[in-house]
Amino acid sequence: QVMLVESGGGAVQAGGSLRLSCAASGRTFSNYAAGWFRQAPGKEREFVAGISRSGVRIYYADSVKGRFTVSRGNAENTVDLQMNSLKPGDTAVYYCAAHREVSSVLSPATPDYWGQGTQVTVSS
């Protein structure tokens, strides 16, 4: 079992930045790939970013490429999402997720573990 807890959400104006953090506990987190997803009101949950167990392979949704950066600290059992140049369309609840394989953190249907989510609100 892997427990995930997100933090760092909040309200920001368009063009601003936020840094989300996901703290993992339970099993050895370095054995798991991690992903970030988001869900806006009335919309389906969507993939944002994914990172492999070693941190070598990284993937982004087209909508966030060049603005968001995912990173992990295996010694600290954390995965972070740096979000820059935020837009109102980025407003959503952001979730951290984990699975042993990075291919399974690229879709909201397949991660084994989920955090509770953190709200990000971007105003124009």
Image (cartoon, helix red, strand yellow):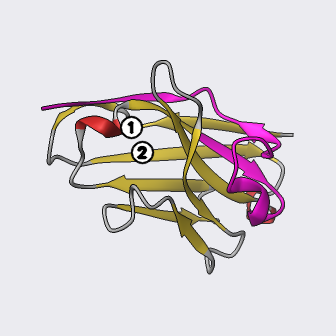
Residue 123 vs 32, above or below: the answer is above
Q: Which residues are magenta?
A: 96-124
Find numbered disc 2 in the image and state the secondary structure of the residue it sits on: strand
* Tag 2 residue: 20
Quarter that holds the C terminus? top left
Q: Residue at x 44, y 61 (%)?
A: 62
Q: Quadrant of residue 63?
A: bottom left
Identify residue type, mark 1: Gly
> Crowding at label 1, few (<14), some or many (≥20) Cα neighbours within 10 Å?
some
Place of residue 93 in the rendered image (x, y in percent of width and height, measured from the top left) = 47, 29
Pointer 1 with pointer 2, Cβ within 8 A = yes
Identity of the amino acid at label 2? Answer: Leu
Residue underneath mark 1: 8
Separation of residues labelled 1 and 2 (CA atoms): 5 Å
Q: Measured along the vertical axis of the image, is residue 47 above or below residue 11?
A: below
| Membership of 114 in magenta stretch | yes
What residue is at 36 percent from the left and 56 percent from the top? 82
